[in-house]
Amino acid sequence: MQLYSTNNPNYKVDLKTAVLKSLAPDKGLYMPSKIDRLSDEFFKNLKNYSLSEIGFHVCANLFQDSIGAYDLWKIVNNALTFPAPVVKINDKISTLELFHGPSLAFKDFGARFMAQLMSHYNKDENKKLTILVATSGDTGGAVASGFYKTEGVEVIILYPKGKVSDIQEKQLTTLGENIYACEIEGTFDDCQALVKTAFLDDDLNDKYRLSSANSINIARLIPQSFYYFEAIKQVDNTKENIIAIPSGNFGNLTAGLLAKEMGLSIEKFIAATNENHIVPDYLSTGEYNPKPSIATISNAMDVGNPSNFVRMMELYNKDHKAVTKDISGYWTTDKHVLETIKRVYENNDYVLDPHGAIGFLACEEYIQNISKDKNYIFLETAHPCKFLDTVESVIDHKIDLPQRVKELLNKKKEATQLNKAFPSFKEYMLSR
């Protein structure tokens, strides 16, 4: 498998380099040079495949001969140890529940797969691999869980102070062992900028073998494509499929586009955001204008300059008309999110988290304006218990906490406090 830099299509690397380096030397993101359609036989048998079997076939199609079949099956099967069920909310709209993994968020798919893949590639290396990751909420916990006690790998997680939920913070600051947390005085965009700058710093690269577990790493995106196949296999195959994706850094949407490129039947994606509506604005106007992120109750989506937008543009050769043929935009406010969580709980006895609520609203708007007779699916990206205070105050009901969350709450937080200036972070890294 060959991958190229989005800043220079002539600069190409193999899969191992792309996974372990994360970012190209010219700051570009890696994209597959070739995305083949999956076979007709695969789609004919899709409803009979397990999630692991889907993942194996997708990877074999993309990776070509980069990894042997035995090792590839082991990587996929060890990563995907939990389900992704489609659950009906009402007679028109269903949700794909992606919170059944160990950290209760969709990021478990990418983080666990990446941990297995990196471990495979790292087994013959003498120098420890250091993973840098910025999180706006769920990524940190998923990466911490996925890489916990992985031999030859350490993880340093940067998160914005006061802008993640209590449970999210506990998930990334209490494991210890090979997992380290840095609490940054700033936003997620500041954390992400620190990670990107670190990859380009000569001093840090002399001291560390650096890689990333953010969705800038192609190994995060590929496994996120698996659950789109898993969703479509569970719904009525006589109807067209509309999928609403709560979006922040747009890794989830890009993964869905990869699945579509590989032949999966999806008529339309809805890029659903909170008040950080940079991409919906682009879809409406054709102008892309990044802005400082705005804090909302759907904090994992508080991104003002989504990294994966450049990958979306690559898939469509920057053709706005082609993009809008496949993707519609939607955005909403915290007020409407809270009203929707309350309404869906009262009417449908289902507890949405503040991110999934935005996907649900996007489906409702599309049904009202376009068509009712389709499969409408939105991604429920995190368990509502991760936003306990917000959700419980709206539904006026206690959420049953999973046992692993109850155990977390009594653990002690361990994090290094840093400002958002790169010299501060660099000094921390060099002094470790």
Image (cartoon, grey):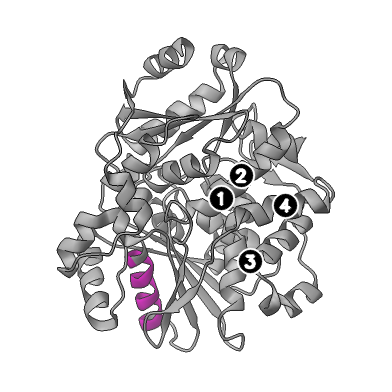
Q: Are marks 2 and 1 in contact (CB under 8 Å)?
A: yes
- Give the residue pinned by disc 2: 114
Kindly report the distance in space between the C-alpha atoms of the residues bearing marks 3 and 2: 16 Å
Give the residues in magenta: 357-368
* Relative to 143, residue 183 above or below: above
Q: Which mark is residue 110?
A: 1
- Residue neighbourhood size for the residue with mark 1, other residues' Cα within 10 Å, grouped as few (<14), some (14–19), many (≥20): many
In front: label 1 or label 3: 3
In the picture of the structure, the residue carrying the numbered disc 4 is 74
Q: Position of residue 97 (x, y in %)?
A: 45, 67
Lower position in the chain sequence, tag 1 or tag 4: 4
Q: Which mark is residue 51?
A: 3
Does any portion of residue 230 appear in the rendered image? Answer: yes
For marks 4 and 2, the one nearer the N-term is 4
Of residue 302 and residue 289, the one placed in the foreground of this image is 302
Q: Nearer the viewer, residue 299 or 104?
A: 104
Relative to 430, say whether 93 is above or below: below
Task: Check disc 3 and give the amino acid type.
Answer: Leu
Cα–Cα gap, marks 3 and 4 = 14 Å
Amino acid type, mark 2: Met
Residue at (15, 62) in percent of width and height = 393
Q: Residues within 10 Å of mark 3 (few under 14, many from 20)?
A: many
Q: Is residue 213 magenta?
A: no
Disc 2 residue crowd, few under 14, some 14–19, many 20+, Cα 10 Å: many
Q: Amino acid at mark 4?
A: Lys
Percent across and percent down for residue 113 are 61, 49
Look at discs 4 and 2 and give the one toward the viewer: 4
Residue 165 seen in the current view: no
